Image (cartoon, grey):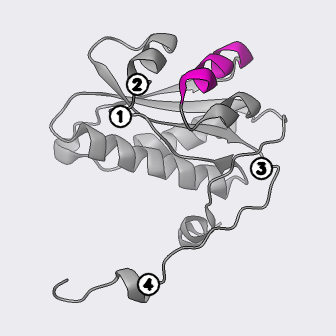
Amino acid sequence: MEAIDAIRGRRSVRKYRPDPVPREIIEEIVDCGRLAPSARNDQPWEFVVVTEQSIREEIAAVATYGKFIADAPVCLVAFSRQTPRFVEDTCAAFQNMLVAAYAHGLGTCWIAGHNTPYEKEIARICKAPGDYRLVALSPLGYPDEECTVHKRELQEVLHWESF
């Protein structure tokens, strides 16, 4: 799949088939995150892949808008050490992963992590070191729904030379 097609086609998925995702595909998706740009090349991110059902259920129970994490075969969790641009850096990496997942025919749904009421609890569940911050998480699996969503038209968001 072409990169532009993957970016244009990716949508948030909230219903997943139970089919397992091959480890090689998961590793390739995370590798795409690893290759993202970062300020000063800090690369502050760390990624936890959760396939264990009981842990996904625990994460889903505390993630305010992520209850469907329990229904996907995988949960991707992005943590970061605190550098000057850790949120931007880790979000760039996470976006790479979501697009790579779509290119493999997989669904995802970005769920906020940074500065959320459940940030510390998910860090505890995933055994993240104390100086790492949760940035984002997403279920990962084969979609069990057709996803369409309205996106604002280019003319609504594009400004030349000034706002």
Give the residues drawn in magenta, as a range.
53-63
Q: Is residue 3 above or below residue 58?
A: below
Label 2 belongs to which residue?
Answer: 119
The amino acid type of the residue labelled 4 equals: Leu
Q: CA distance from mark 4 to mark 3?
A: 27 Å
The amino acid type of the residue labelled 2 equals: Glu
Q: Position of residue 64 (x, y in %)?
A: 53, 32
Report whether 152 appears left or right of 55. left
Label 4 belongs to which residue?
Answer: 154
Crowdedness of circle 2 by 10 Å Cα count: few (<14), some, many (20+)? some
N-terminal label among 4 and 3: 3
Q: Is residue 85 magenta?
A: no
The C terminus lies in which quarter of the figure? bottom left
Crowdedness of circle 3 by 10 Å Cα count: few (<14), some, many (20+)? many
Q: CA distance from mark 2 to mark 1?
A: 6 Å
* Contact (Cβ within 8 Å) of mark 4 with mark 1: no
N-terminal label among 2 and 3: 2
Report whether 46 appears left or right of 162. right
N-terminal label among 1 and 3: 1
- Circle 3: element type: loop
The N terminus lies in which quarter of the figure? bottom right
Label 3 belongs to which residue?
Answer: 143
Label 1 belongs to which residue?
Answer: 114
Q: Position of residue 112 (x, y in %)?
A: 44, 40
* Contact (Cβ within 8 Å) of mark 2 with mark 1: yes
N-terminal label among 2 and 4: 2
* Contact (Cβ within 8 Å) of mark 1 with mark 3: no
- Circle 2: element type: helix
